[in-house]
Image (spheres, grey):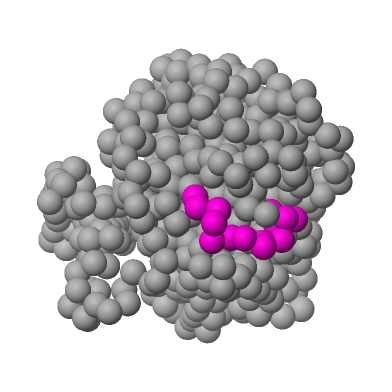
Amino acid sequence: MGLYTRTVPSYGSCEPDDRMDDTAEADRLLQDTDDAEGVDEHLHISPYPSSLNSEVQDGVRKIEAISKTWTQRSLVIAYLGIMLMAFCTSLEVQTVASLTAYATSSFSKHSLISTVLVIQNVVNAVIKPPMAKFADVFGRFEAFCIAVFIYVLGYIQMAASQNVETYASAQIFYSAGSTGLQILQQVFIADSSNLLNRAIFANLPDIPFLFTVWLGPMIASWVLKQLNWRWGYGMWAVLLPSAFLPLALSLYINQRKAQKLNLLKSKPWKGKGLKKILRSAWFELDVFGLILLSAAVTLILVPLTLAAHAKDTWRNGGIIAMIVIGGVCLIAYPFWETSKRLAPHPLLSLGLLRQRSALAGCALAFFYFMAFYFSVQPYFYSYLQVVQGKPVVTAGRITQTFSFMSTIAALVVSFMIKYSKRYRPFVTFGCVVYILGLALMLLTHKSGKSTLQILVVQSIIGLGGGLVNVPVQLGVQASANHQQVAAATAMFLTALEMGGAVGSAVSGAIWTSYLPHKLVKYLPDETKGEATEIFGKLTKALSYPMGSPTRDAIIRSYEETMQILLTIALCACIPLIPLSLLMKNYELDKACPLCLFLLLFNVRTEFLTFFSAFKVDQRVKGKLIGNIGDSEDASPITPQLSAFPPPNLSLTKRRSQHHLRP
């Protein structure tokens, strides 16, 4: 019996794709059923058509081949592995969020929280495209292994750091690994997803945040009391690799199956010399484009947080040189990326920005996350402890309320998108709610507010964030075809992280410029000489009891500085609503002509309900497993963890006889 090929479009673009006319002979291997005689009819079949053009890279072909070998058991193991990783990484995020202030304070550099976050956001911004590109070129399994290794390396370095420089440099490895895992999880799930159902399943991996948001601060508090902050970092170097094992084994075993079935071509580097391999890697991974983008963002933003500590501040030659060089790199970057000769495989698909929705969506993500880093991050946790007098656990839970509420909101809006088949109204409404929450945060930032008042405000901000994030990414993805969707997702997330990096940098510049002067201005004469230590150590600021003249002066300094940050956050939100209205209001059940053609071959299009299959999926902020529409001859839904049911044997026979190819 021939291999049953379901041709459900997974990436489905709502824009016509003019690249899909040419079919390369090399690509036909993945479409030919003759080589697959005798394959188990219960194999899980690829949810998307095989790549139809010669531009598709080896890693994309590899995952298309591997997807043809999935059994129900291996698919269950793979998604359980992803969910296990989601739980582990979400718990890690909630735990270490309460440790950063204490780690930097131990080096007397509390104000450098913003520098640490700038480094994180810069790496987050620039690592997504090359990691997605690496996955496309070499394969998903290989990319996952690299990301986990880098992640572990970063945590080991942070746990062993003896100064703030080592701690900050460890953020490069940590952020590269954690962000690499994020984008790879997204790409992996997108490999078995379609456009219409994407928003629902995308948020299932967010479910651990509903629990870890309460567990993380408790673990952090226990670590700080019983051990020290270093253990809070080091333990993840053991936990994450353990959580990765089920997914790793599933990917590796199915990759071997695909090789035995001759579904994989030989390795692209086989038979090439070192020079040719390096040259191919240079162009395939767009190494120089990565260097330009990394240098531009780093050299422009990091000096903003360091200038206040530098000799002669902004007149320091090193600060000026970094900003100038960064500006030159930023100007050169788009010219490099748009050159077919210099960058045949560009890091970012800048051509997608010609699509109105992609451009508006990326810009909206930039301003949305920039406002977040003027408000909820990076100093809100310290503010809660110093100004509001909240203990570690309470402050940690309040700061993570955003994650909790945004997760719930994203799940709800995903189902609403599924059944309304529209996404733009939710973007606009989410922007309104988000702005309202930030305005309330500004109005209630004074000391003496109850925990309930603060939680309500943070819940409103989280509600707005959840309503914005998923539908905006969905709109950007709707403009991408299969080969471009990883790059489109990376471009959206890069814009998001760029906004966070800018927000962190400007927040740090404001904090380091205003807070020390305000402390000197308001502190009583007997403690005025301790202003530098109070500024540099959170523990020193907390050592003065509430109601004492020194604590009142510290609170006033924090309040006035926080007011400046929140005012700027509101200003950053001004473009959000206009940008949301610029995005095209796609009908998500309508696809491009190619997708409509492919739908003719889709026999059964049922999807599993949330509870019957629990729709195993991973946190990808915008993708999910499932099919589109319903078929008259569809059989009852079979409880299984794949959204793709067993094959229709009569149609399988007809297809194998006629070798139908889309």
**Residue sitting at 65 percent across and 29 percent down?**
628
Magenta stretch: dominant SS? loop
Task: Please determine whether, in this image, residue 611 is positioned above or below residue 28.
Answer: above
Task: Please determine whether, in this image, residue 417 is positioned above or below residue 541.
Answer: above
Residue nearest the observer in this picture, 621 or 496: 621
**Residue sitting at 47 percent across and 83 percent down?**
162
Point out residue 432 in the picture as x, y percentages from the top left corner. Answer: 57, 19
Q: Is residue 420 visible?
A: yes
Q: How many numbered discs sit on the rendered protein?
A: 0
Q: Is residue 527 magenta?
A: no
**Along the horizontal axis of the image, is 499 left or right of 524?**
left
Quadrant of residue 648 within the rendered picture: top right
Task: Please determine whether, in this image, residue 247 is positioned above or below residue 127.
Answer: below
**Residue sitting at 34 percent across and 26 percent down?**
355
**Along the horizontal axis of the image, is 599 left or right of 220?**
left
* Stretch of the chain drawn in magenta: 31-44
Q: Is residue 465 visible?
A: no
Task: Please determine whether, in this image, residue 611 is positioned above or below residue 105.
Answer: above
**Along the horizontal axis of the image, is 9 left or right of 281?**
right
**Residue sitting at 49 percent across and 50 percent down?**
31
Residue nearest the observer in this picture, 110 or 34: 34
Point out residue 282 in the picture as x, y percentages from the top left corner. Answer: 23, 65
Point out residue 1 in the picture as x, y percentages from the top left corner. Answer: 68, 54
Point out residue 481 in the picture as x, y percentages from the top left corner. Answer: 42, 37
Q: Is residue 42 magenta?
A: yes
